[in-house]
Amino acid sequence: PAGICPFKMVLLGESAVGKSSLVLRFVEGKFHEYEVSTIGGAYLTQTVSIGDITVKLELWDTAGREKYHSLAPMYYRGAHAAIVVYDITNADTFSRAKVWVKELQHQAASNIIIALAGNKVDLATTTRQVEVADAQTYAEENGLIFMETSAKTSMNVNDIFMAIARKLPKL
Ligand code: GDP
Ligand code: MG
């Protein structure tokens, strides 16, 4: 239909936490155990319906350039929403996610919607390093949407994108 306003959504977080995999799971319903860096191009789009409103999401992946932090503002400039991803089996990635959140709170649009995704929850029973309660508390203190996700099993993947979509301003 005409007049669908696209919303820009960026994915941020350490390399290998599963950003590209979350996008691939959400947009194409797929998961690759190895090598998904090739899909980290410019952006993918997905159209979702919320009641009778249709929202087009432009999903910006960081294209494997996480190391080049100076490029980050280019990704989140003009973004309506951000998903900051960490890997629940790697505590360093959670610390890094908090730095991203702080940067977004100071540098991005003041009304940006920020979600925190604790990815790879399918590995929770064997190799969890970040407790869900700690992430939950942090998210509540910072007004973030929070879910643990798995791009592998698809747990909470649609849910986190839809939770964001529901908070976007409706025209
Ligand atoms: P990115 O660098 O943040 O984009 O991370 P990728 O999407 O490239 O994923 C890095 C690696 O983690 C790949 O081998 C993926 O198959 C794997 N991976 C991503 N998400 C999950 C998940 O939810 N569970 C498990 N077990 N592995 C995952
Ligand atoms: Mg990637």
Image (cartoon, grey):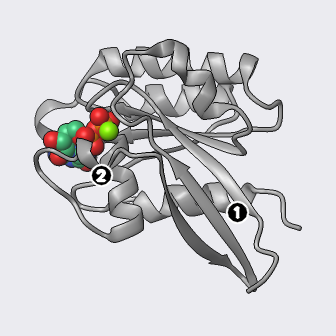
Pointer 1: what residue? 166
Q: Position of residue 26 (x, y in %)?
A: 40, 63
Q: Is residue 11 depicted above or below 33 in this figure?
A: above
Task: Give the spatial CA distance, label 1 vs label 2.
Answer: 21 Å
Q: What residue sits right under mark 2 in the picture? A: 150
Q: Residues within 10 Å of mark 1 (few under 14, many from 20)?
A: some
Q: Residues within 10 Å of mark 2 (few under 14, many from 20)?
A: many
- Is residue 77 found left or right of 62 in the rendered image? right
Mark 2 vs ligand 1: CB below 8 Å: yes
Q: Residue visible at 45% across and 42% down? A: 61
Q: Quadrant of ligand 2?
A: top left
The answer to whether one can see residue 120 in this image is: no
> Foreground residue, 18 or 146?
18
Can you give x and y, in whole percent of width and height, for residue 4 in the image? 76, 73
Q: Residue 106 location, x and y as percent? A: 74, 16
Residue 138 is labelled as none
Q: Residue at x 25, y 23 (%)?
A: 90
Q: Which residue, as the protein is rendered here, is positioned at the far right? A: 171
